[in-house]
Amino acid sequence: MTEKIAIIQPGLMTSAYKTALALAKKTKVVCLIGRNKPFPGFVNSKSLKIYEMWDWLLPDPINATIVPGIFCSTYRVLRKEKPTIWLVYKHMFLTSLAAPFLKLFGQKVIVVTDTFPGHIWWTRSRFVNLAMWLYARTLGKLVLASADKVVILYEGLEETAKKLGLDYTVIHNGVDLALYDNAKPAPDLSTQGNTIITYIGRLHKVKGYDDFIAVAHELAKKRKDIEFWIVGNNEDQHESTNSIKFLGYRNDIPCILKHTDIYVLPSYAEGLPNTLMEAMACGKACIASAVGGVKYLIQDGKNGLLITPGNRKQLQDTIKKILAQPELRERLGHAARDTIRDQYDWNTLAKEWMDLIKSICEKK
């Protein structure tokens, strides 16, 4: 029997979107996605069918989606499409409440997560941390218990998964290398011969983007040959300068990265960050906080440089170090590309997904 996979995700979930595209090359995929963020190239096709549901993203520092119609939308897809298995992303978002709901109808469910909020993942807000702590021990616990299998996205989560008594396996996020190899620099942007240092991601405090901006202002006073590009929804309406440019939300991330010389991700908490993997796939020298899955992507000094979150002086000094050593920048970039090719290529990971799905579907 050919499996039909249903994927449930909030609208901002890049890893789920990429999984859907990869698995649609192997079998039929139905995707139930929140509407708050569009994805380029994510359209109906012969093997991929998309349903939308309303969701609202609560602002920083909460950064959670409210999905009032999750049960009705899930039931509609269940009745109409009759999937053989469901992938529910991620247990920290309220879309994951579909998992225990689906078990009421005897469905096979995989819950996917890149971290365990309330256990090992924390924000810069005490209020949000308290809410996560409570969620992890109530609804979050129910979600994980309802799964036929929990997929964690990197090895650093195994200790927590064991403590929680989960039936789990590890499958990484992936990168379609061809997408980045074939990309061309964005035609509407010009580097003017300057060195480009880029941040890509949500402009939320947990991402440390304010640290990046503060360091950018300091370095821009001393260096006229560098530019800082910030890519992400500019909800606070930051204004661009000659050296610091807010590019807003972009659909052409591979093209942005083609312009980039140094990529920076100064987060306070992360799972397995897609934007960092994308920058590494493009062979860019990367600086990132030593948090979450970043520590499994980057070996400090070998394929990137690690910093302490919130340490603006260290971030500034590390940027200066790469700027002063072009050979270091080149070496780190090559090693970063090799890491993604060897461990995070979707051609390999899609097969791992299909093998897991087949084994669960064959169980009585």
Image (tube, rainbow, N blue to C red):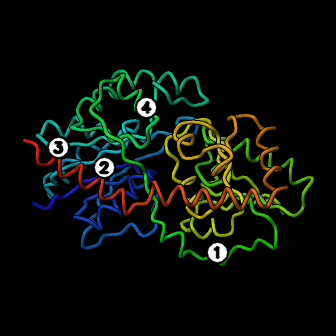
Q: Are marks 2 and 1 in contact (CB under 8 Å)?
A: no
Find the distance from the CA under tag 2 to the CA under tag 1: 33 Å
Q: Which residue is mark 3?
A: 108
| Quadrant in which residue 26 is drawn | bottom left
Find the distance from the CA under tag 1 to the CA under tag 3: 43 Å
Percent coordinates x, y for residue 81 in the rendering: 16, 58
299 sits to left or right of 172: right
194 sits to left or right of 332: right
Q: Element type at marker 2? A: strand
Residue occupying image coordinates x 56% and y 68%: 252
Residue type marked 1:
Pro
Percent coordinates x, y for residue 273 in the rendering: 52, 48
Q: Front-most of 173 and 84?
A: 173
Q: Element type at marker 3? A: loop
Give the class, few, some or many, for how many residues have Cα within 10 Å of label 1's Cα (few <14, many ≥20).
some
Give the class, few, some or many, for how many residues have Cα within 10 Å of label 3's Cα (few <14, many ≥20).
many
Which callout, 4 or 2, points at the residue further toward the start of the chain?
Answer: 2
Q: Front-most of 342 and 156?
A: 342
Find the distance from the CA under tag 4 to the CA under tag 2: 18 Å
Which callout, 1 or 3, points at the residue further toward the start of the chain?
Answer: 3
Q: Which residue is mark 1?
A: 185
Q: Which residue is mark 2?
A: 8
Give the class, few, some or many, for how many residues have Cα within 10 Å of label 2's Cα (few <14, many ≥20).
many
Query: Where's the N terminus, which quadrant?
Result: bottom left
Q: Are marks 1 and 3 in contact (CB under 8 Å)?
A: no
Q: Which residue is mark 4?
A: 116
